[in-house]
Image (cartoon, rainbow, N blue to C red):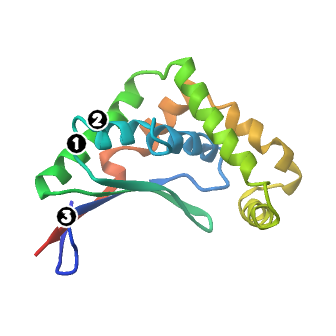
Amino acid sequence: MKSFENVLASAPAFHLGFRIGSPSSNDFYVLSIIDYILLRGQSSRLTRRLLNRNNKIAYQLSGGIEKKKDRAVYKIFGVVNTPLMADQCLEAIFSELDRLKKAFLSENELARYKNMFKQDYLSRFSGLAEKAIFLCESYLTIKNFDDLPLELDRYLSVTKNDIVGIVNRYFTADNSIILNIKTK
């Protein structure tokens, strides 16, 4: 874990990153659903765990998949009140990842996240600009552009077993980097 003091930081924070599969790999379908499980929406696991009203240990949480050509990382950024809370957040994040590694999601929970993903995926066709961005991204990441009509089905065919396997492969302490940002 690396610490960094910043005079301009208004509050302590942390960055947590994991190297993940290439955007053109089959793992990316599963990783995209895992992104929804962890961080997308108010019902996502990390949002519920770190930002809930009764036990709020972070006051800002963001992140997701970041793609650069044929490489990708999964990033989580949190802003907290104290450095101790940053440690608590990181502990809670790894605890949620361990839960995903050991216990299967319920069918209802997986269906809920897939439906959220599907809604967001289809909204990418709502306007000309959105369509253009989608097609550009697809051209850069899909191996065969003729497979584009099958893309949504590949995301929606992700299983509970797929999720457990990918979380065990990529979301480990050995494959992570943590940067703590401290105020002076």
| Callout 1 crowding tier (Cα within 10 Å): few <14, some 14–19, many ≥20 | few
What kind of element bears circle 3?
loop
Residue nearer the viewer, 182 or 58:
58
Residue at 55% x, 44% y: name it. Answer: 31
Q: Write down the residue under mark 3.
A: 12
Q: Quadrant of residue 114?
A: top right
Residue at 75% x, 56% y: name it. Answer: 142
Q: How far apart are marks 2 and 1 (CA)?
A: 6 Å
Q: Write down the residue under mark 1.
A: 91
Q: Position of residue 53 (x, y in %)?
A: 27, 38
Residue nearer the viewer, 30 or 54:
54
Residue 95: numbered disc: 2
Q: In which quarter of the image is residue 91?
A: top left
Q: Where is residue 96 in the image (x, y as percent from the top left)?
A: 34, 35
Q: How far apart are marks 3 and 1 (CA)?
A: 16 Å
Mark 3 or mark 2, earlier in chain: 3
Mark 3 or mark 1, earlier in chain: 3
For this view, does 14 lie left or right of residue 144? left
Q: Are marks 2 and 1 in contact (CB under 8 Å)?
A: yes
Q: Are marks 3 and 1 in contact (CB under 8 Å)?
A: no
Q: Position of residue 129 (x, y in %)?
A: 77, 67
Q: Answer whether residue 98 is visible to the viewer in this image.
A: yes
Instruction: Report the amino acid beneath label 2.
Output: Ser
Q: Are marks 3 and 2 in contact (CB under 8 Å)?
A: no
Residue nearer the viewer, 119 or 149:
119
